[in-house]
Image (cartoon, rainbow, N blue to C red):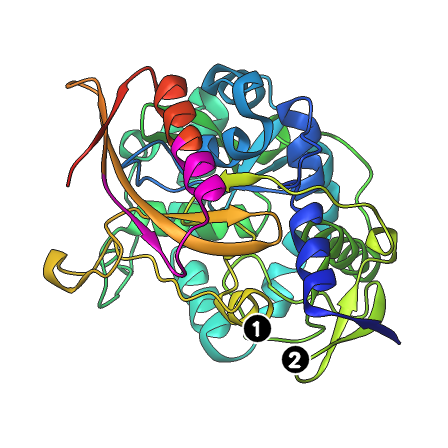
Amino acid sequence: MHELSLDEARRIAVRAQWLDADRPGELLELVRRLTLLQLDPTSAIAPNADLIPWSRIGWGYSPSHLAAAIEGRRLIELHGFLRPAEDFALYRADMASWTERGQTGWRKSVREWVEANDACRRDLLARLAAEGPLPSRALPDTCAVPWKSTGWTNDRNVTQLLECMVSRGEVAIAGRRGNDRLWDLAERVYPDDPVVPAEEAHRMRNTRRLQALGIARSRTTQAPVEPADVGEAGEPAVIEGVKGTWRVDPEQLDQPFEGRVALLSPFDRLIHDRKRMVELFEFDYQVEIYKPAAKRRWGYFALPVLDGERLFGKADATAARKAGVLRVDAVHEDVPFARGLRAAVEAEIADLARWLDVEPIRVE
């Protein structure tokens, strides 16, 4: 059982996410370490899939690098995340057993809905085989039973059926045209690598996730698509002042640490698990995109401020590309910034503006 101080645990988490002073050299190296890039349509400053590499690589990163990796199928989209192409061998066994796993609860109802629309599923496969890749609006909706939901997916039969077919390993997202996903047969998108058996694949995914997080709970609240826990990967640890046991990547123990100041995406994996964020970093933060403006404490797309192994505040900024400015409405200091930290944050904001090719302006 490893005994860690809170600062040691924080440094492990920051270093594992490649947010220390030792920057990665290029995009694929980074994504292989992080295991994923989350896609999100919100781009008040820049899309999350670009902000994450910029916060780590810095000036060596350009969005064109991401576009080239997607076009060259070195990064492939799966359920809203870009993953290294070679990692798909770790998911194919689960895809093959999708029907068998859908025997209870909501999985059972989804399986039954897919079975009720088997004719439509076959129509989609035939059209993609003949003409793919295609956007969903170019595909026929011949569903006998509509998809019912109280949310925005209600009656979106084709897209919901395609999502299920991705889970079954039948179709895949071949790329994007603007914001439109392009669908094709999975066999034409995924690498033809040997499939890793399911049990071994789960162990490997847990190990890879722990390597990306550095330190995590063995079990925690279930998260959709990408879990926040790591099973029995790594080695057990306790953290001074934090209840319970953790799992730590042994490769991260007793490593040197040199921190730096960074502005993080609201969807950064360092803070994505909010419970872990509070336990490790004692940081108060929420994404406020969906809150009314009058109820926001920090701003529509506030960027958490990292200094070394601590999170100290949030920068409320918005990029207006047509006007050519990065509008900075506030820099919220959770505790008063030292003069050096304030100067470093201003330098990061200026760097972000130059990377975006806009001018920073402060709004008092």
Image x and y of residue 144, in percent: 29, 56
Q: Decide which of tag 1 and tag 2 comes sooner along the chain.
A: 2
Q: Write down the residue under mark 1.
A: 279
At label 2, which amino acid type do we have? Val
Any magenta on residue 114? no
Extreme residue in the bottom direction: 243
Judged left or right of residue 179, residue 225 is right
Relative depth, front residue between 65 and 188: 65
Hey, what amino acid is under mark 1? Glu
Q: Position of residue 111 (x, y in %)?
A: 48, 65
**Residue 182 seen by the camera:** no
Is 323 or 151 nearer to us in this picture?
323
Confirm or deny contact between disc 1 and disc 2 (CB under 8 A). yes
255 relative to 242 in the view: left or right: right
Up-down: is 289 above or below 279?
above
> In the image, residue 330 lies at what x, y percent?
25, 45
Mark 1–mark 2 Cα distance, whole angstroms, equals 7 Å
Among the 4 quarters of the image, the one containing residue 318: top left
Q: Of residues 226 and 143, which is closer to you in this image?
A: 226
Q: Which residue was labeled with disc 2?
A: 242
Instruction: Check residue 333 for magenta coloring.
Output: yes
The location of residue 274, given as percent across then percent down, is 48, 66
The residue range painted magenta reads 329-346
- Residue at 44% of width from left, 43% of height from top? 339
Count residues near mark 1 (Cα–Cα under 10 Å), then give few for <14, some for 14-19, many for 20+. Answer: some
Q: Tell me where residue 286 sits by quadrant.
A: bottom left
